[in-house]
Amino acid sequence: MSNRLLLLVSLSIFVATALLVAIFGVIPLPEYEDFTLDNQITGKLIFNVEIQTENILPPAPDIVDTCIFYIDLSKEPLTEESIVCSSDLYELPYDINFYDARIHEKQNIILYYWDYESSNERKGLIIDIATSEILEQIDTEFYSNENNRMNVYGEKLIDPWESSDYNSRSIGIYYVSRTETLEVFNSKAPSNYYFESLHWSPDGNYIVANDSENNLIIFSKNKSFTPLKIHLKTEFSDNENIEMINVLGWTN
């Protein structure tokens, strides 16, 4: 009789555990609306991507190319357009670092490299966003990430790694206005879901981030709409995919 009772107790515990996992253990991804031109948000989102092979077995994936793309929010359908790729610059006698790329003077891209042949100093290559032309090579100036976090109102974005608690499966977007911290978005999410590289829109009213699902997410500072999602068309060509690395910024 005791064995039978023990079996029933064990079965009950198993069923209860399975129900708890089903109810509380699986947390879905946050829900967003799809971006459309009806949202009347304009500008260009500039972001860094890797073009990768679809290898299944290690080492996988192989990085075929690194590029800087943009999406024009005022044109439909939304499509990723290339500004410059590392393969476009193979003829240059130095190695360009795409992962430190910045938006320069709101209309160009600056790519950094080390000039080992002459000065052995860090230099910058200026690329026109509209034409993809190399405009000039410059000595690099000091650049602070703090400049990227501040909008035209002096409001400062908080790094998502500081405002999210992945142990409790909570993620959020926040900014500081003078001495007050304001919430833009907060949601439960899987522990492997996160936001990266937050940037203000030129008018300071919206925020863009890329997430771990290869999406661009646009948030309203004043919560005037549900966050909007732009999903990258990840298929680049045969056996190659696009993987977003980070957002460089938001230009007019």
Image (spheres, rainbow, N blue to C red):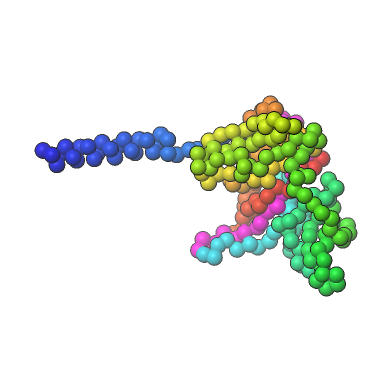
Q: How many marks?
A: 0
| Residue at figure coordinates x 78%, y 37% from the top left | 151
Answer whether residue 203 is visible to the viewer in this image.
Answer: no
Depicted 152 relative to depicted 47: above or below? above
Q: Where is residue 10, by image quadrant?
A: top left
From the viewer's perspective, tell me whether residue 230 is left or right of residue 13.
Answer: right
Frontmost residue, 192 versus 141: 141
When the figure is inspected, residue 96 is found, relative to residue 170, above or below; the finding is below
x, y (%) of residue 39? 71, 30
Q: Residue furthest left?
A: 1
| 193 within the magenta span | no
Question: Horizontal and vertical percent for residue 6?
Answer: 18, 40
Looking at this view, name the residue that lies furthest to the front: 179
Q: Can residue 110 be seen at all in this image of the molecule?
A: yes
Give the quarter of the figure containing the N terminus. Answer: top left
Q: Nearer the viewer, residue 23 or 167?
A: 167
In which quarter of the view is residue 116 placed?
bottom right
* Highlighted range, magenta: 34-57
Of 35 and 16, the residue lying toward us: 16
Q: What residue appears at the point 79 percent right and 66 percent down from the top-left corner?
A: 114
Q: Residue at x 83, y 50 (%)?
A: 104
Quarter of the image with the C terminus is: top right
**Where does residue 117 sit, x and y in percent of width and height?**
83, 73
